[in-house]
Image (cartoon, rainbow, N blue to C red):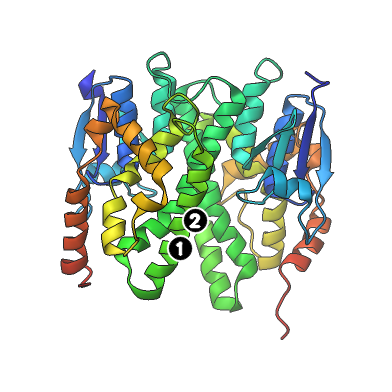
Amino acid sequence: MAEEIILLDYWASMFGMRTRIALEEKGVKYEYREEDLSNKSPLLLEMNPIHKKIPVLIHKGKPICESIIQVQYIDELWPDTNPILPSDPYQRAQARFWADYIDKKTYVPCKSLWSETGEKQEAAKMEFIEVLKTLDSELGDKSFFGGNEFGLVDIAFIGFYSWFRTYEEVANLLTIVEKFPKLISWAQRCLKRESVAKTLPDSDKVLKSISDHRKTVLGID
Amino acid sequence: MATEDVKLIGSWASVFVMRAKIALHLKSISYEFLQETFGSKSELLLKSNPVHKKMPVLIHADKPVCESNIIVQYIDEAWNSSGPSILPSHPYDRAIARFWAAYIDDQWFISLRSILTAQGEEEKKASIAQVEERTELLEKAFNDCSKGKPFFNGDHIGYLDIALGSFLGWWRVVELDANHKFLDETKTPSLAKWAERFCDDPAVKPIMPEITKLAEFARKLFPKPQA
């Protein structure tokens, strides 16, 4: 079964983490292939010619692109183990809405948080704080975004947790821990799941990698 | 099911609202259409979609569902025993349909709209070229997805047909505005034929807005700068 599923990914990608978590949740064996984003493999370019981005899930030679689409695909293929989407249509719509919200609202500012400086970075900070506020409010006193069960929206956002320390350091985004205790408890709860603990990289490793990249590639001190 | 309380907040001119309407028609669901006033947002809209404050919003038994593609999937799932299936049945085909629907919204539509908002001829030309390129990809996607059948979804219109087909009115308006044909028998033979079939579909025909009305609305939305 392992050779039937290949995942082209990058270790620190919060998007790739979604797909890895979903595969782990289902107990599905797969081959992980690390991509060098500065030198993308011919396979990546062949399998995702439109966006040329990771993650790319290749199942029996056929590519599936876009992380939330991959997670739903995995959930539909293995519906009986640890369901990721709820069964109720309204709850499913809510889960998709919030996963879509996270995608729409984080992609641009989160990149700017670590790749920009000055005004652009400040603007990105404001945007990201708004996202955290909204998600914090949506989570409320629930254990997970969907209620009592770990699901799509948790998978959509948890990867960002491994980047919080990086954002705090590099963007001077003070204490996500202090400002959003509910989100932090939620993240800790998610980390108790083996799929998440296995997948999320060490926060300090992410910080070091980004700090190095800022210095050597972007020329930012 | 027909007596269930279904409302749709939207506007006659909106592509995204049209997606929800088509899905409701496909499933023969009766609903109350709440037309938003141009230039302002109703209390109900703001209350039902506090995050994005946008239409369409489907309100089913007082519970709001937002985002057109999510609404279409919801309609398919909540009324799964009525009418044809909107999403393809195989998980791989669903993933491909979702991928292209996202591409249409995130890339294709953005370049289409930029034709209307372009400042000057150079910008317009560049936007036109981009739409040409992206439409070529959709032509290929159609051939791959339809596998020789009349629609992206096969024998009947489905999720991806709805995602792209809802744009056909506006697409025609842009073609007229730019004096440039994107959909034609030589450049996009498959899509050109598909467009006709889509517009003729009984779930679509009664709700496709008139091009002249849309063009007039476009002039209001995208006023031309004074010479």
Question: In the drawing, does residue A168 fall left or right of residue B205?
Answer: left
Number of numbered discs visible in the structure rendering = 2
The residue positioned 55% from the left and 28% from the top of the image is: A92
Q: Amino acid at mark 1?
A: Met
**Res A186 → quadrant:** top left
- Residue A128: x and y in percent read 43, 57
| Tag 1 subunit | A
| Tag 2 subunit | A
Question: In the drawing, does residue A97 fall left or right of residue A22?
Answer: right
Q: Which mark is residue B62?
A: none
Q: Which mark is residue A130?
A: 2
Quarter of the image with the N terminus of chain B is top right
Query: Contact (CB < 8 A) between labels 2 and 1?
Result: yes
Spot the residue most to the bottom: B227
Per the image, the residue denoted by label 1 is: A126
The residue positioned 55% from the left and 49% from the top of the image is: B105
Question: In the drawing, does residue B184 fall left or right of residue A78?
Answer: right
Instruction: Classify 10 Å Cα crowding around label 1: few (below 14), some (14-19), many (20 and above).
Output: few
- Residue B94: x and y in percent read 49, 29
**Res B124 → quadrant:** bottom right
Above or below, A3 against B225 in this view is above
- Residue B133: x and y in percent read 48, 56
Quarter of the image with the C terminus of chain B is bottom right
